[in-house]
Amino acid sequence: AAELKDMCTNKGLKAGVGKEDRVERLLEEARRDGEVDKVLANLARSSRGEELLAMESAELKKLCDKACVDALVTEVMVERLLCHEAEHGTAKEIAEPAAK
């Protein structure tokens, strides 16, 4: 409880009376600051990285070719694909534009 109070104080938020009030204020502040979005994006990136690492090299090479990413070794291909997808979307999304 004291830790939550300190966290509220450090962020310039009212400390409130109860634990639930403090948690709610901290969550709302995290949403406003984009912290929640950053955490979710990192989780999605991590999950996608694991998915790509589990693929066969030939399939990764195909994705790299579709995304115009230079392929070297599996870890490099995965990292480059993640960077490309963060900017442009997945190769599947690029190949199959959304129906209007």
Image (cartoon, grey):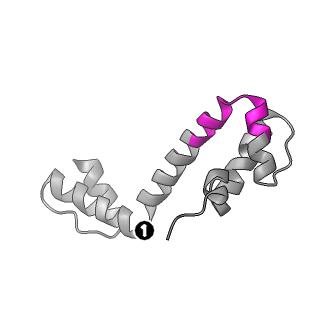
Q: Which amino acid does label 1 sit on?
A: Asp
Q: Does the magenta stretch include residue 56?
A: yes
Q: Between residue 3 and residue 61, name the one nearer to us.
A: 61
Left-right relation of 43 to 88: left
Res 59 quadrant in image: top right
The secondary structure that most of the magenta stretch takes on is helix
The residue positioned 29% from the left and 49% from the top of the image is: 3
Q: Is residue 34 magenta?
A: no
Magenta range? 48-61
Disc 1: which residue: 33
Q: In this view, does 19 lie above or below 35?
A: above
Residue 74: x and y in percent read 78, 34
Q: Between residue 75 and residue 11, name the one nearer to us.
A: 75
Residue 76: x and y in percent read 79, 40
Res 23 quadrant in image: bottom left
Residue 14: x and y in percent read 23, 68
Q: Between residue 34 and residue 11, name the one nearer to us.
A: 34
Q: In this view, does 78 lie above or below 88?
A: above
User: Total number of numbered labels?
Assistant: 1
The residue positioned 83% from the left and 34% from the top of the image is: 73
Q: Between residue 5 and residue 79, name the one nearer to us.
A: 79
Q: Is residue 91 above or below residue 62?
A: below
